[in-house]
Image: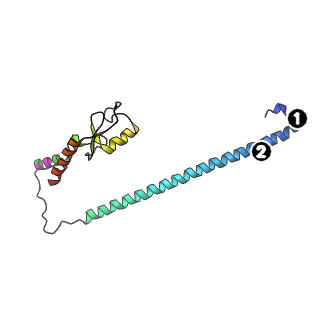
Amino acid sequence: FPLSRVPPDGMAYALKDHDSRLVKMLAEHDESITEMLERRDKGMREHAASEAVALEDARRSWRRRLRRAQDWKPRRGARAPEPASSASAQALALELEPPADFICPITAEAMRDPVMAGDGHAYERIAIERWLAIRSTSPLTGKALENTGVFPNHMLRRQIREWQERSRST
């Protein structure tokens, strides 16, 4: 309200009334900010607690695996493997290593469910679907994709399975 309209004798009352409304507004605003900060802090504490639980579960799991590995003993009557020549060891390592075409460019792991994307490259289905859920570009080239659909790559899946079977038998 404009103070020029308030007569001099009523000025003290007008200012007092204005101040009390202002103080009340500030107090309400302060309460809402305090509540918001408390909710945020509570959420952050809950999130930190859940992360701590997940971390502790992972630690327990790795400790169990480590104990099993340390407690492992060869079966009775089992012979130790004979040392391989360096050439045969290298050949075996190459057979165990998946061919580059079997590796997903997004996950850098051998694909289980390969699909063909609009850019003509093969990807792991889950990885490319997650990529395309937030982007419409090729993960390899960065260019915009005209078609964001994915199609099963049956031939590549068959080749990967054959390679896996060969790797298991060696």
What's the coloring here?
rainbow
Q: Is residue 43 left or right of residue 31?
A: left
Q: Is residue 91 magenta?
A: yes
The picture places residue 4, in percent across and down from the top left corner, at 83, 31
Tag shown at residue 8: 1
The picture places residue 98, in percent across and down from the top left corner, at 20, 45
Query: Nearest the camera: 21 or 161?
Result: 161
Whether residue 30 is visible here, answered yes or no, is: yes
The residue lying at 15 percent from left, 50 percent from top is 166
- Residue at image mark 2: 20
At label 2, which amino acid type do we have? Ser
The picture places residue 153, in percent across and down from the top left corner, at 24, 41
- Up-down relation of residue 49 to residue 123 (above or below): below
Residue neighbourhood size for the residue with mark 1, other residues' Cα within 10 Å, grouped as few (<14), some (14–19), many (≥20): few
Predominant SS along the magenta part: helix
Examine the image and state in which quarter residue 139 appears: top left
Query: Nearest the camera: 162 or 105?
Result: 162
N-terminal label among 1 and 2: 1
Examine the image and state in which quarter residue 136 appears: top left
The picture places residue 128, in percent across and down from the top left corner, at 33, 41
CA gap between label 1 and label 2 equals: 19 Å
Q: Is residue 97 magenta?
A: no
Residue neighbourhood size for the residue with mark 2, other residues' Cα within 10 Å, grouped as few (<14), some (14–19), many (≥20): few
Magenta-colored span? 88-92
At label 1, which amino acid type do we have? Pro
